[in-house]
Image (spheres, rainbow, N blue to C red):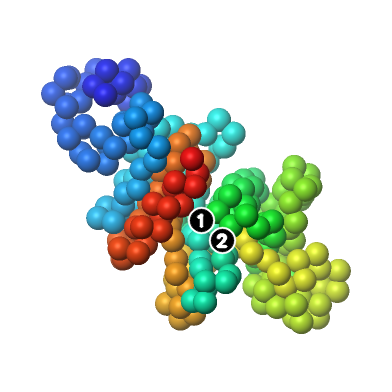
Amino acid sequence: YIDFLSNKKFTANWPHAEILNYLNNPINKALVILACNDTDGVIAGCTVPTSEIIRSAIRIVGINKNSKWVSSIFILQSPCKKKILTYGDCAVIPDPDSEQLAHIAKDASYFHKLITNEEPKIAFLSFSTDGSADHYRVDKVREAVKIFSKRFTDIVHEGEIQFDAAVSPEISLKKNINSVLRGEANVFIFPNLDAGNISYKITNQLAGYSAFGPLLQGLAKPVHDLSRGCTIDDIVSVAAITAIQK
């Protein structure tokens, strides 16, 4: 592990003692063990900020060759355990541009399929549905949908769309008669971190959904964060999700 760290760019010119000190941090050590293929995944973050986990993961584990950015999702499970939703991004990119939104949606759709074995149905969320409002924030979402539509034609998606039209068949038909989602979205892409983070916590606290995450996307190996308000059940569930990735 010392040799591995010594060959990383960010440790160039570090003295031996500094590398040993870096490895004494349990999160850093766990990530080095993962990078050296001696474990299959890392779960951390119940005592440290998300930013620390992501920064160390990028340095040590690296970015997936098929991704450009690290982002996150939350898996939301209904109290009756019959409905599972995916929210992204809720913890990493504060104000994603259109290209980033498209990548977040792609990664979230693959993750949703892996975890639930259900076909992803993506809603690119906005305060507008099918041109009901004009604003530069709406334009960003529309552009993201155009990018996504060109690259991932096989994934069901729609946008820009309001949340009620994405989850209610009746409202969906009222707001967009040509809707492809028809109120059956299960993957929700939020236009910024404010919307995503606030929404998953509202869903968790007021609707009683269990929230698992933030689950990190875009890294070369499975690394997942935990909310500092996580429970034992949350830790167990994220561990199970990490196992499914392998």
Measured as percent of width and height from the top left, residue 107 is found at 59, 47
Q: Residue furthest right?
A: 178
Q: Is residue 234 left or right of residue 244?
A: left
Q: Is residue 200 visible?
A: yes
- Tag 1, which secondary structure? strand
Amino acid type at circle 2 is Thr
Q: Quadrant of the image for the N terminus?
A: top left
Image marks 1 and 2: residues in contact by CB distance under 8 Å? yes
Q: Is residue 202 visible?
A: no
Measured as percent of width and height from the top left, residue 232 is found at 30, 63
Q: Earlier in the sequence, mark 1 or mark 2?
A: 1
Mark 2 = which residue? 86
Foreground of the two, 15 or 219:
219
Disc sitting over residue 135 in the figure: none
Q: Is residue 14 left or right of residue 52?
A: left
Query: Local crowd at mark 1 within 10 Å, few (<14), some, or many (≥20)?
Result: many
On screen, residue 39 above or below 107? above
For the point 75% across and 42% down, the residue is: 151
Quarter of the figure with residue 21: top left
- Tag 2, which secondary structure? strand
Foreground of the two, 112 or 45:
112
Measured as percent of width and height from the top left, residue 191 is found at 59, 60
Disc sitting over residue 73 in the figure: 1
On screen, residue 69 above or below 177? above
Amino acid type at circle 1 is Ile
